[in-house]
Structures are given as C-alpha cells and as structure tokens.
Image: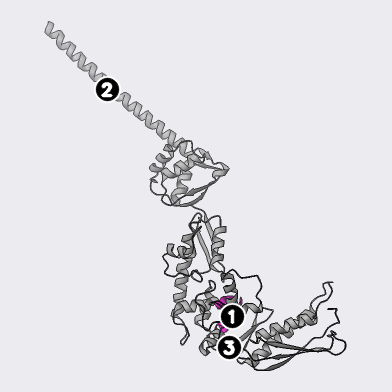
Amino acid sequence: MARTNSRDRSATDQASRKRGAFWLIRRTIILTAGAVILVVAWLFYFAFTPLTVPETARQLQVGPGSSYHTVARQLVANGVLRERLTFIALGRLQGKGATVKAGVYELPETISALALIQKIARGDVLIAEITFIEGWTFSQLRAALDANPAVRHDTAGLSEVEILQRLKAPETHAEGLFFPDTYRFNSGASDLQILARAYQTMHTRLQSAWDQRSAELPYATPYEALIMASIVEKETGRPEDRKLIAAVFVNRLKRGMRLQADPTVTYALKRDGKWTGTLYRSDYGYASEYNTYRITGLPPGPIDNPGATALRAAVLPARTDFVYFVADRAGGHTFSRTFEEHLDAIAAARRHDREAAVAAPDSGEPRTEPRRLRQAMEEVDELAHHLRCQAVELFCVVDGDEGDLSTGALLVAHRDIGDHCSVTILMLSCPGPREDT
C-alpha cells in the first residue's frame, strides 16, 4: 500500500514538473513575443515619427569614410536624435550599415528617421558648382575656390609648389595647367579634388589639340603650345580673331621677331607685385623673363589658363603672312603684312578714336576734346610706342597765337631705334578751340 502511494506521488510530481515547464515555456514565448512586438512597435514608431530638425542642423556634413555610427553621433550632437542606438538598429535592418557617402545632406524642418536613412543611403548630397573663367590666372582660381562655401579648403596655407605635389603633378609652375570650365561637385568636396579634375581635363584637352596640330609649328612640346594659347587668350576676347592673332605670333617666332605682347608685360608686373593697375610705356622695358618686349621667343611658362578656343588657335593658326596687328576701340583688330601697312592701321585707329570723341553726346560737362598741347603730345608719345620707337622729338607748328591749336599741326620726327623703325615723318593735326594751359 505504501509502495503504491509512493508511485502515485512520483507521477504527480512529474506531471507537475511538466506543467511547470510548459507554463515556463509558454510564459517565455509570450514574453519574447511581447518583447518582439514592443521592439517592432517601437522601431515602427521611431521609423515613421517625424523628427524635428533644428535650424542650425539643416545641413548635415558627412566626412569621407564616415559610418552610420558616426552619422548617428552627429545627429545626436545636432539635436536631431535623442539617442543613436535605435537609429543604428533601424539602419542595419534596412541593410545600411556600411560606409556613408561623404558630402552635405540638406535636411528639411521635419523628416522621419526612415526617410533620413533612405536619404543617406541614396547618397542624396547637395550638388554645388564652380566656374573657372577662360583667361583666369591660378591665383584667381584659388580665390574662387576659397570664396565658395560649398568647398572644403584643404589647400589653405599651401604654396603653389605644395599644391602641385599634392596633385602628383610633375610641373613646378601651376599657371596654365587647369582647364577653365564649370565643375559640379558634391557639396563639401575638397578643393584638391576640384583642382585635380581641372588639371586632368587640361592635360586631356591639350594632348588632343597637340595631336591635331598643323605642320611646321615653332613649338617643340605641347607645353610650348599651351604657353602660346595663354598669350592668345589674353590678347583678345573675340574668338573669331584668335586664329589670326596666333598666326601673327607664329609668324613672328619663325622670323625671329619678338612677340611684343602686352599681356606678358602685365603678367610679369603682377607676378612680381609691381602692377599699378595701368600699363605705362615705361613698363615695356621691365626686366622679366616673361616680358616679350625684352626676350626673343616664348616666355618660360603660360600667363593664364586658356580655354578650348585659344588652345585650338595655338595649334591650328590661320594660314596667313600677317606679322602685325593693332586693336581698335570696338575690341577688334586690324592685321598687317608690312610695317608700312601697320603704320596706316595705327593712324586709322587713332583717327577713328578722335572722330568718336568729337561725335560723342554732349554730357553737359565742359569739352576737353580736342586736347590741349600737352595732351596731344602724350597721344603722340603713345603712338611712338606703337611704332616701336623710343626717342621722339616733337615740333609744334602753330598758326596764330602760341597755344592756339585750331589750325596747328604736330610735326613728329621718329628716330630709328627699334628693329623696324626708319626715320619717319608724321603729321598729326590738332584742331580745336583755344584753351588756357
């Protein structure tokens, strides 16, 4: 009887333990399911509840190599998130745990966490742009980069040579190496990245132009063609004149004549910190390896960053025997084959200037044109410079009282000092009302 009772108690204990285990498993399942439901509900709530973005955090700057952990910490620091773990967990559930695309992400006033994660996953960064103008110098390019708020300024404090080293460029002179164009980039990109693109673009464009060059050009290397293109770029803003101007310079190089290009003088003065804002006749004697009034041949490097039209002009100049040109006030040029034709072109340009001054509308101000004797002498001095002469003797023949220029004339004798000047007699009329000097 006692043995039977013992067996009954044992069976009861086993049944009780089974019931306990069952209820434990059931409770665990219920609790786990409840926890999962709570987590899912929380993630759902977190994912779709709008986040308020402070005004100071509307642009999220993500650096290179950043992860969702880094971004989450930034969002907490900026007051967009209260804590970062849920954001990271939601990102992992979306399969977005890898490196985030660098750049600047523009955030609206309110955005859900899920929309924010998807925005970052798409790499939906702000796109900015910068334009380098044809004919800009390297210092102007740097100034434009420094002034652009969308650019990360990694070149700050670096010298020209150090920048070229960072770009792994073999050159030591940065002028002319960067192609002028509009470059689009992710906001927050490094200025070195933009310069690298402009450098590579110029290299590609220059090589392409060089491969299409005319025969018998006086350039030994593509770099010399780049130097010529930079001079052509500065000589005129009229694309239709560039091939003719390039032809003049090419013909002068072939004949051993100096280029005598004004922009090289300006560049030399600016490069040495001597530029005053005006090019004076005395500046043409400035001692510099870039001054083509003093040197024969090309300067040692470009004087600006030329565009595609100037590059093509330098390697495909017009077929002509022009060796002179003179600019007019309209921005065009008159081209000449001989020095005599050149003198006529200069005289015609000056005559046109005087006629335009006389025909100008009356502004109500006292008329100062035609000029006083001193001003007329300065004009003649300028003309003498264009004739490539230096020593100038002025003789003023005046009909009537001294200083009365109404019927007077300037007799100018130019003594031969330059390569092309012979003794030349010119008459410049000086009509105009009498003025007190």
Relative to the observer, which residue lies in front, 175 or 55? 175
Secondary structure of the residue carrying tag 3 is loop
Q: Position of residue 67 (x, y in %)?
A: 41, 46
- Magenta highlight on residue 214: no
Q: What whole-number distance in Å separates the C-alpha atoms at marks 3 and 1? A: 12 Å
Disc with the residue nearer the chain's start (2 vs 1): 2
Which residue carries the number 3 mark?
Answer: 323
Q: Residues within 10 Å of mark 3 (few under 14, many from 20)?
A: many
Q: Amino acid at mark 3?
A: Val
Foreground disc of the pair 2, 3: 3
Residue stretch in magenta:
231-246
Q: In terms of depth relative to the viewer, which is nearer, 11 or 370?
A: 370
Query: Which residue lies under the disc numbered 1?
Result: 261
Horizontal side, residue 345 vs residue 75: left or right: right
Q: Is residue 233 magenta?
A: yes
- State left or right for residue 278 relative to residue 428: left
User: What residue is disc 2 on?
Assistant: 22
Q: Residue at x 55, y 69 (%)?
A: 137
